[in-house]
Image: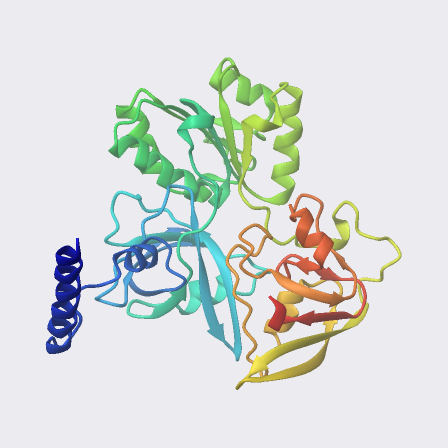
């Protein structure tokens, strides 16, 4: 036994001597590298191609800007949080991946210009081939789970809400999965139908992929369905509702409408999956907003943070009808960054300790009970009703 111990000690000694003679370690932490490959905190992306999808939507293709770092794998239906910095403001927005998860040579994002938006107009008007953007790794839980979702899927999309479904359909067809899919796409006009040719081509050669487009403002020569995605349109297209799982992506108003239509068909909520709701256009119209709060009300937001090893504190005015994160990002000179991804209260990257104050959170946003009990909020979707005190050093 002592001989074996001696051999082990000699082997360890020889190993250390060998390592010291090498210019770089002869081994690497495989697990750490694998974790960084699968779940990177940040990605650096270079624009390689830009295409017009419609009058207000563009398709952007990105590759890794770091030649030594591959793009992270993702599940069809997930998104990345894209960071934009302009006019002295650093902010981010989530965009669904359109590209297939089976080809990691590039990512593709379909971005629609929101007229009242802040980031999408800038990206569509200024982003060009060769530009480099920072982004999160793939995030989100809006993807197909074979254990729970079955083999009969109904995709309901409004306008650019089709983007995650394009990735899903590509994945299903490329892998030859035995899954039946019914796609119901609602748009204003024919010019607003994204990926129309691809969808029609796939449906023509794949008997398990079915596509129906419904226009709410069609031209007189439109031969397809008109109106809205009603319960009758859904039922007439998919036949029976038995053993079907429903995915829905669209505007907040569309979510409420579709939810009512599906409930009228007696479809239980556990067979519905919604993409993140996002920030409301007008928080004062969301159910539960306190009527006694004036939308013009200003509040004082105090933030504690670490800078150069020292704890600092600053205060600034914020609006009660704007998420706390947005108000913080508007403080151009502070450069305080709270990591975020979804801007909807789901990914929890922006989880922050609230020392004091009261906030309003849309009722559909799920906050963990332990976070509520210990005063943690998601500033991306939290609206200050009173003066707020945040401590980033406790986050």
Side (left or right) of 35 relative to 377: left
State the image quarter where residue 190 is shown.
Answer: top left
Q: How is the image coloured?
A: rainbow
Is residue 45 visible in the rendered structure shown here? yes
**Nearer-the-camera pick, 232 or 13:** 13
- Picture coordinates of residue 286, whole percent (x, y): 74, 48
**Which of 188/142 is in front?**
142
Residue at 12% over, 57% down: 3
Q: Residue at x 54, y 22 (%)?
A: 234
Q: Quadrant of the C terminus?
A: bottom right
**Quadrant of res 75:** top left
Res. 49 in view: no
| Nearer-the-camera pick, 331 or 386 | 386
Instruction: Give how far across and how far down residue 143 sits, in percent.
Output: 44, 38
- Whether residue 237 sits left or right of residue 378 in the image: it is left
Q: Residue 276, position in %: x, y?
A: 56, 46
User: Residue visible at 18% across and 70% down?
Assistant: 25
- 14 in relation to 101, above or below: below
Residue extending farthest to the front is 2
Which residue is pictured at 46% across the width and 66% down the height?
Answer: 83
Q: Is residue 364 above or below residue 22?
A: above
Res 60 → quadrant: bottom left
Q: Position of residue 17 (x, y in %)?
A: 13, 74
Q: How many marks?
A: 0
Q: Residue furthest right?
A: 292
């Amino acid at each position: 036994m002592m001989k074996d111990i001696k051999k082990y000690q000699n082997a360890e000694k020889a190993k250390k001597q060998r390592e010291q003679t090498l210019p770089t370690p002869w081994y690497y932490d495989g697990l750490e590298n694998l974790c960084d490959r699968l779940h990177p905190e940040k990605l650096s992306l270079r624009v390689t191609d830009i295409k017009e999808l419609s009058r207000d939507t563009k398709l952007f293709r990105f590759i890794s800007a770091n030649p030594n770092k591959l793009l992270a794998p993702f599940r069809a239906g997930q998104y990345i949080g894209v960071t934009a910095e302009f006019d002295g403001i650093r902010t981010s927005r989530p965009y669904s991946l359109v590209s297939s998860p089976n080809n990691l040579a590039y990512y593709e994002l379909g971005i629609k210009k929101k007229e009242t938006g802040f980031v999408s107009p800038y990206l569509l008007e200024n982003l060009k081939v060769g530009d480099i953007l920072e982004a999160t790794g793939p995030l989100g839980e809006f993807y197909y789970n074979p254990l729970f979702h079955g083999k009969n899927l109904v995709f309901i999309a409004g306008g650019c809400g089709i983007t995650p479904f394009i990735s899903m359909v590509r994945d299903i067809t490329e892998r030859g999965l035995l899954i039946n899919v019914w796609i119901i796409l609602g748009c204003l006009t024919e010019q607003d139908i994204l990926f129309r040719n691809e969808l029609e081509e796939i449906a023509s050669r794949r008997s398990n992929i079915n596509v129906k487009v419904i226009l709410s403002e069609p031209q007189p020569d439109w031969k397809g369905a008109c109106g809205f995605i009603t319960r009758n349109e859904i039922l007439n297209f998919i036949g029976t509702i038995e053993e079907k799982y429903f995915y829905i992506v669209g505007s907040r108003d569309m979510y409420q409408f579709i939810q009512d239509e599906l409930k009228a068909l007696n479809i239980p909520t556990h067979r519905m999956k919604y993409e993140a709701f996002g920030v409301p256009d007008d928080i004062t119209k969301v159910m539960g907003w306190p009527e006694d709060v004036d939308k013009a009300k200003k509040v004082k937001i105090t933030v504690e943070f670490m800078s150069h090893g020292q704890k600092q504190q600053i205060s600034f005015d914020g609006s009660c009808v704007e998420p706390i994160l947005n108000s913080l990002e508007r403080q151009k000179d502070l450069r305080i960054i709270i990591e975020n991804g979804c801007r909807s209260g789901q990914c929890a990257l922006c989880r922050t300790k609230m020392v004091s104050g009261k906030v309003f959170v849309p009722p559909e946003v799920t906050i963990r009970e332990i976070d509520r009990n210990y005063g943690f909020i998601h500033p991306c979707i939290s609206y200050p009703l009173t003066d707020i005190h945040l401590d980033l050093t406790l986050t």
